[in-house]
Amino acid sequence: MKLGGIKSVENAHDDSVWAVTWVPATANRPPLLLTGSLDETVRLWRSDDLLLDRTNTGHCLGVASVAAHPLGSLAASSSLDSFVRVFDVDSNATVATLEAPPSEVWQMRFDPKGAILAVAGGGSASVKLWDTSTWELVATLSIPRPEGPKPTDKSGSKKFVLSVAWSPDGKRLACGSMDGTISVFDVPRAKFLHHLEGHFMAVRSLVYSPYDPRVLFTASDDGNIHMYDAEGKALVGTMSGHSSWVLCVDVSPDGAAIATGSSDRSVRLWDLSMRASVQTMSNHTDQVWGVAFRPPGGSDARGGRLASVSDDKSISLYDYS
């Protein structure tokens, strides 16, 4: 696989762009790129030429995460204002507004069937699960407090949850914490299973292989990308190459490669068969907060796409083959 730059949009937002995802195609339209920014807006972009489709407002602080329903009909944005706004992609009508205490809304992901929206709960040391048919809170997956000699020591007793990822079968959910711990849950039983160890700084992004529900990729401020057997609790591989924090990771639709973004301002492509970085893209002039491979499907069959977003306010679009 090789990346080629297609287009970059400078000043895509009025401030840092922190979040990016693809809205899958529907019967009536091709996929769209969805971005969220510190400028408090969410923007939708045409898939191949990055022309602005529309701007959504509604948050009163920066947008920390965006997520798209697998059917492409709904999307959600979470903000530092502690609200999650769920909206109809085509009409921008608000479908639901989910409220949380301060600092308890971070990254979000819909499960593979679109039945549940998982929200990383920040300082609550938990992941909240919302039913997408009723928009009611149906479960809170809490990370157990570590057993130690000083349970009153608040600094080490709670996990600050930053990131979430669903396994492709929807049975497992993994979340990354500020201290580098990854927690794995059995979702049907709403049960904590185990921690994955190995990182020693914040895990801001993680993603499961689309084909193997055991394989989990994680990105950390410690500069490393880890590949875990999330069921066997084993660290399978470590990939290094970025010169600073690794802020985001996504896996290609065929499961053969991952892309990462870093505060070293680069996007890297990694070949998983070699477990090595095979390409570095330096389009951005500031740290890269999000990378996202376009999912397959829809009539828009012009090959693979990868998007990246940055503190430099820009979006870059790449093709790959």
Image (cartoon, rainbow, N blue to C red):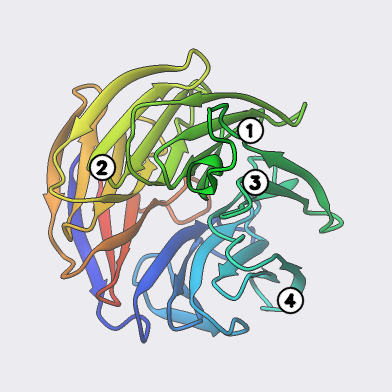
Instruction: Give residue 39's position: percent from left, percent from top.
Output: 44, 83
The Cα–Cα distance between marks 1 and 4, rounded to whole angstroms, is 35 Å
Residue of label 3: 127
Q: Amino acid under label 2?
A: Asp
User: Relative to the observer, which residue lies in front, 166 or 152?
Assistant: 152
Q: Amino acid under label 1?
A: Pro
> Which residue is depicted at the point 40% across and 23% down?
228
Q: Residue 222's mark?
A: 2
Instruction: Give residue 122's position: percent from left, percent from top.
Output: 56, 55
The answer to which of marks 2 and 1 sits earlier in the sequence is: 1
CB-based contact (under 8 Å), mark 2 and mark 4: no
Q: Amino acid under label 4?
A: Thr
Q: Residue 94's mark?
A: 4
The answer to which of marks 3 and 2 sits earlier in the sequence is: 3
The Cα–Cα distance between marks 2 and 1, rounded to whole angstroms, is 24 Å
Q: Residue 144's mark?
A: 1
- Position of residue 124 in the picture relative to residue 1 (left or right): right
Q: Is residue 170 above or below residue 60?
A: above
The answer to which of marks 3 and 4 sits earlier in the sequence is: 4
Picture quadrant of residue 4: bottom left
> Which residue is depicted at the point 47% across and 71% down?
36
Element marked by disc 3: strand
CB-based contact (under 8 Å), mark 1 and mark 4: no
